Image (cartoon, grey):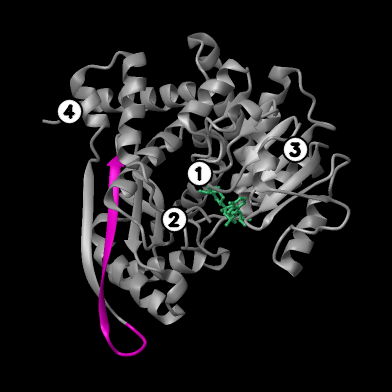
Amino acid sequence: MPQSGAAINPFETAKRQIDIVADILRLDEGTRAVLKHPKREFTVNFPVRMDDGSYRVFTGYRVQYNMARGPSKGGIRYHPQVTLDEVRALAAWMTWKCAVVNLPYGGAKGGVICDPKHMSRGELERLTRRFATELVPIIGPEIDIPAPDVYTDSQTMAWIMDTYSQEKGYSVPGVVTGKPIAIGGSEGRGEATGRGCAYVIREAAPKLGLKLKGASIAVQGFGNAGSVAAKILNDEFGAKIIAASDSQGGIYNPEGINPHKVEEYKQKSGSVVKFPGAKSISNEEILELKTDVLIPAALENQLTSKNADKVQAKIVAEAANGPTVPEADKVFFEKKITVLPDILANAGGVTVSYFEWAQNLEGYSWSLAEVNDRLNHVMTESYARVHAVAEERKVDNRTAAYVTAIQRVVDAMRFRGFFP
Ligand code: NAD
């Protein structure tokens, strides 16, 4: 799990990124200022009854960053180090992520300062339902649609959906995504991030003359996103997984390892470490392996000025959010390493969240095949657009993705105008 909170103020980083793109797009001061301010911020302090009968006050946030392209979308995280600036930054990044894959959404994010590892299920349910009650006036299928994030899951979404529905007097499945399938969740949501990442890699590889069949893949962080990407690259595109890791360490075999067997082994033993037939390596070493594709799928700030020049991969596909720091990006651009940036490479999750919401509004469920087919279409189109912008402007893919996203948000703002 990624850690919440960071030494560098993430919202300052988010604003710097906006300035860089605003310079490229030659945006006027007024437009820049709108882009650098969250539209709406909600802070609430609310009491929760604990199991011992005492009451504790918790603080929760919801930031709706920009809604020019549609209702805002973004997860809710539970973590002791949640800050308002972190939530603002994450809400800005959701705005760009939804725009780069052209979903009719703005961006939002939420968080509650709490330590879910030290709370009972009952306490978490009461916290979630009370926070949801406070959110009722500002969320809804046409306003703002939360989803799971760090330390929240489909059960958390079910509680929010139920609480909101109780308030309205009827079931409103479209108020959240990432729900259990039994109450309107979508087929394919669980594997969407990894699948979307695999599709983007498939599109990028031929541009470098790389054939995915037999190509070597190293995955740092064999969790939800990383393991699914590995299995799809192996099963559907004939690539060879040569290394995988988790928080305990990594494994490596240049002849290839079966990702399904690794997953079974991890489920039994708790880690990929000591998987039979592979050599042990560290999480630092996995980033520096000779491999065609490197998938950082664990934490932020993994590829830095310290290790960027040792990276030998041809493609770095960011399943994780923020694994590459800007100094490393520069090195990769100079070394002609193709970076598939997070807002594109891991947007499969929010894309299938959008499908879930669309199915809820339609009152009709799509088959897994239909979900995957549409996901394939969105990821393929989005990669093509970002690649074209990168070529045209002679910039790296990350800059191209931001330029694409921010231009779309600005277009929406301009057509709507600044009322009154
Ligand atoms: P997860 O908890 O399922 O998996 C994370 C994996 O990383 C685990 O196997 C964990 O052991 C490993 N890990 C933790 N610390 C590590 C370390 N120091 N070195 C190597 N591995 C380490 O989480 P996930 O849902 O797969 O998310 C992973 C990343 O993908 C995060 O950055 C998340 O924000 C991003 N992401 C996930 C989704 C999604 O839908 N799951 C969507 C968008 C982005």
Q: Looking at this rendering, what residue extends furthest in the front direction?
A: 306
Residue 51 shown in magenta:
yes
* Distance from the alpha carbon under mark 2 to that under mark 3: 30 Å
Query: Which segment did they paint magenta?
Result: 50-66
Q: Residue at x 69, y 50 (%)?
A: 245
Please state which amino acid type lies under the numbered disc 4: Phe
Q: Are marks 2 and 4 in contact (CB under 8 Å)?
A: no
Image coordinates of residue 404 in percent, x first then y, are 44, 23
| Mark in the foreground, 3 or 4 | 3
Query: Residue beneath label 4, please?
Result: 418
| Mark in the foreground, 1 or 4 | 1
Q: Earlier in the sequence, mark 1 or mark 4?
A: 1
Image coordinates of residue 58 in percent, x first then y, are 27, 69
* Distance from the alpha carbon under mark 1 to that under mark 4: 36 Å
Query: Residue beneath label 3, please?
Result: 217
Image coordinates of residue 343 in percent, x first then y, are 49, 35
* Distance from the alpha carbon under mark 1 to that under mark 2: 20 Å
| Picture layout, residue 57 above or below residue 375 | below
Q: Are marks 1 and 4 in contact (CB under 8 Å)?
A: no
Q: Determine whether the residue tagged by mark 3 lies in a helix, strand or loop.
A: strand
Image coordinates of residue 103 in percent, x first then y, are 45, 37
* Distance from the alpha carbon under mark 3 to that under mark 1: 20 Å
Q: Determine whether the residue tagged by mark 1 lies in a helix, strand or loop.
A: loop
Q: Earlier in the sequence, mark 2 or mark 3?
A: 2
Total marks in image? 4
